[in-house]
Each structure stands twice: as structure tokens, then as C-alpha cells.
Amino acid sequence: MKKLLYLFALAGVTALTGCEGDPGPAGAPGEEAFVYEITNVNFTPAGDFGVFFDFPDSFLASDHVLVYRLANVVNQEDVWKPLPETFYFDDGTLDFMYGFDHTQFDVNVYMEGFDLAGVSPDFRSNQVFRVVVIPGQFAKSAVKVDLNDYKAVIKAYGIDESKIIELEAKAKAKK
């Protein structure tokens, strides 16, 4: 019986040894993180204070979506704030906020608050957003990155900002 077991073990080891020869074609390159930019975004009562964007290509449900708003430009440097972004009255109560939701196919950026029509046009008109899509496989990597810091995200995932894709808004928010 021991000899039979030894024979099967030897046959298994022989079968599992590496093959020689042509390894075949290389596989597809890995997924990349990328950025969409949305300019001249206007939040209006007609659009229910939201705007809706279709992605040109769908991505995997496991991919991550981050949205940033251009909050300021200081010394010719863009200042990007992550969403959700909340603004408070002096007494500490909620004034308004920017938020978003998304699917594999689209993203909806919106404002929430108590008197959105009364919010300064500086916050409702001509807003600029960047949507960063990070493949889910990157999230499992050992790289630690502050997702609240747009520049850190761009650097950590090797995103080429010269390849930012422009998106156009649809008039009505998707809710």
C-alpha cells in the first residue's frame, strides 16, 4: 500500500512540474485610475439643485468613485475639496451641502439644504467638479493615501492630469 501511495505522489509531482517552451502572449495591461472634469455646473430650482452626468464608458461595480469641487485658487494652485462638503451657519446648524451618488454608468452631484435658492450664486453657479475613478484592485493594495487630498490621490495612483476627460451635465438631476 505504501508503494502504491508513493507511486501516486511521484506521478503527481511529475505532472505538476513546469513546462518549457513559449509562454504565450502577454496578458492585458492593468486597469488605470482616471479623472473626469465637469465645468460650468449650475445648481438651479429647475434642476432640483442637482446635475447628472453619464460616464462615456461604464466601469466595474467594485471601482471607487471620488468627487472633488474646485473651492478656490490660491497662488495659481487649485484647491479641491472632497464631497460631501458641508457649510454651516454661525450658530452651527446646517446651511447647505454638496453631495453625490453614482452607479457604474453615471454620477449625480447635488446640493441639499433648507433655502438653496437663497445660497449665494458663488456656490450655485459656474462650479467645477472632478470625478476620480479608482479601480477596485488598487483599493486592496498596500498604498495608503489620504482620499480627502486630491493631489495625494493623483500622485498615489499615477494619474496623468493631461488626460482628464470632459463631461457635460444633463439638465435634470437623477433622484
Image (spheres, rainbow, N blue to C red):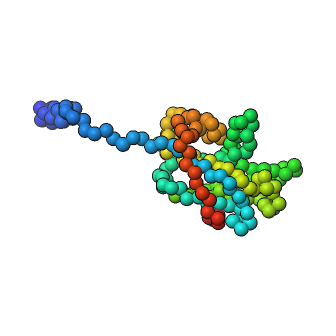
Q: Position of residue 5 (x, y in %)?
A: 16, 35
Q: Position of residue 158 (x, y in %)?
A: 52, 36
> In the shown orientation, is residue 12 left or right of residue 172?
left
Q: Position of residue 37 (x, y in %)?
A: 60, 49
Give 1 or 36, whichever is nearer the viewer: 36
Give 75 or 132, whichever is nearer the viewer: 75
Q: Which residue is rendered at x = 59% and y = 38% of the image?
A: 153
Q: Position of residue 145 (x, y in %)?
A: 59, 35
In the depicted structure, whether residue 92 falls above or below residue 142: below
Give 29 or 162, whichever is nearer the viewer: 162
In the depicted structure, whether residue 44 falls above or below residue 26: below
Can residue 142 be seen in the rendering of this structure?
yes
Q: Which residue is rendered at x = 78% and y = 52% of the image?
A: 122
Q: Which residue is rendered at x = 22% and y = 32% of the image?
A: 18
Q: Quadrant of the N terminus?
A: top left
Q: Quadrant of the C terminus?
A: bottom right
Give 162 or 29, whichever is nearer the viewer: 162
| Residue 94 figure quarter | bottom right
